[in-house]
Amino acid sequence: MKANRFPLSLLMAALLSTGALAQSLPPIRIGDQPGFTRVVLDLPKEATHQIEPLGAALRVTLPGQTVTPGLHFVSLPELAGYVLEQHENQAVLILLTPQGVTPRSGYKTMTLAALQGDGQRLVIDLSGAFVDTSPLPAFPEFRFVKASGRRFSVVVDAGHGGPDPGALGPVVEKAVNLEVALRVRRFLQNAGVEVTLTRESDTAFSPDKRTDLAQRVAL
C-alpha cells in the first residue's frame, strides 16, 4: 500500500504556527554593578526584539524565541525579579523595576557581538539615575484668553527660600523650586498668561514660617 505524502510546505507551516522552530533562549545573565543592574540576553545573530517601558516594569518581546514560563526573584535595588512568558512563537521577558522606567528614563540598552560564535548580546542596564537628556520636542504654540478678552492670571509659589532651605541633599530644594518656578513663568507668559511669583530670588517674606506662608497666600 502506497504511503500518503504530507507536503513539505504544509509541514513547515504547521511547525511555525506551533512555535516548534523557535529557538530556545539561553539562561538570562544578571550582574549587580555599582549603581546599576545589568541584564544580558544571548540571542541569535538574526534575532529581533521590542522593548516597552511600562512604569513599574520593562517588557522585552523576542520573536522566534522560546522560554520556560516562570517567575524569578532577584532582589536587587534596580531589579526585584523577572517574569518569563511564552506567547505562541515569541518569548516575553518582563523585568520588574522598583525604581520605575519611562520612555526617557530608568534604563539603557545596547546590542553587542556575542563573546563566542556569530550571535549577539542584548544588554539592558537598569538604574533610576539613567535619564535621556536629549531635547524634548518643541511645545505646540497655544494661548489662554478669557471670553472677555482679559488675560488669565496665575500665582506660582516657589516654596521655601531664604532661611528655609527645604529638603537637603545633592541639591537644595529651595533652589530647585525657584528654577522650576522661573521656567513655568516663562512658558505661561509665552502663552499669554499673567504670572506673579511669590519670590524671584533666594528670599522669604518672614523668617517665621507661619507668617511667610500667610503672606504668600495673600498675593
Image (cartoon, rainbow, N blue to C red):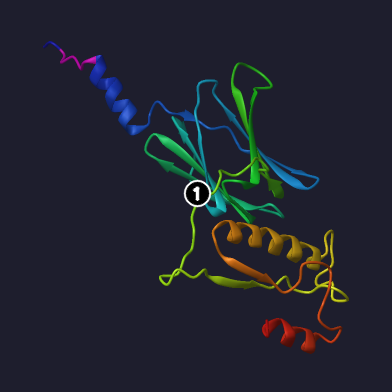
The residue closer to the viewer here, 27 or 217, is 217
Q: What residue type is labelled 1?
A: Pro
Query: Quarter of the image containing the N terminus?
Result: top left
Determine the residue positioned at 59% across, 21% down: 119
Residue 73 in view, yes or no: no
Seen in the picture, residue 28 relative to 162 is either above or below; the reply is above
Seen in the picture, residue 36 relative to 204 is either above or below; the reply is above
Q: Main secondary structure of the magenta part?
A: loop
Residue 28 spot, x, y in % from top left: 61, 38
Residue 118: quadrant of the picture:
top right
Determine the residue positioned at 84% across, 59% down: 170
Residue 82 spot, x, y in % from top left: 58, 49
Classify mark 1: residues with Cα within 10 Å, few (<14), some (14-19) or many (20+).
few
**Residue position for label 1:** 140
Q: Which residue lies furthest to the front in this view?
A: 149
**Which span is picked out in magenta?**
3-7
Q: In this view, does 112 lie to the left or right of 58?
A: right
Q: Does the magenta stretch include residue 206?
A: no
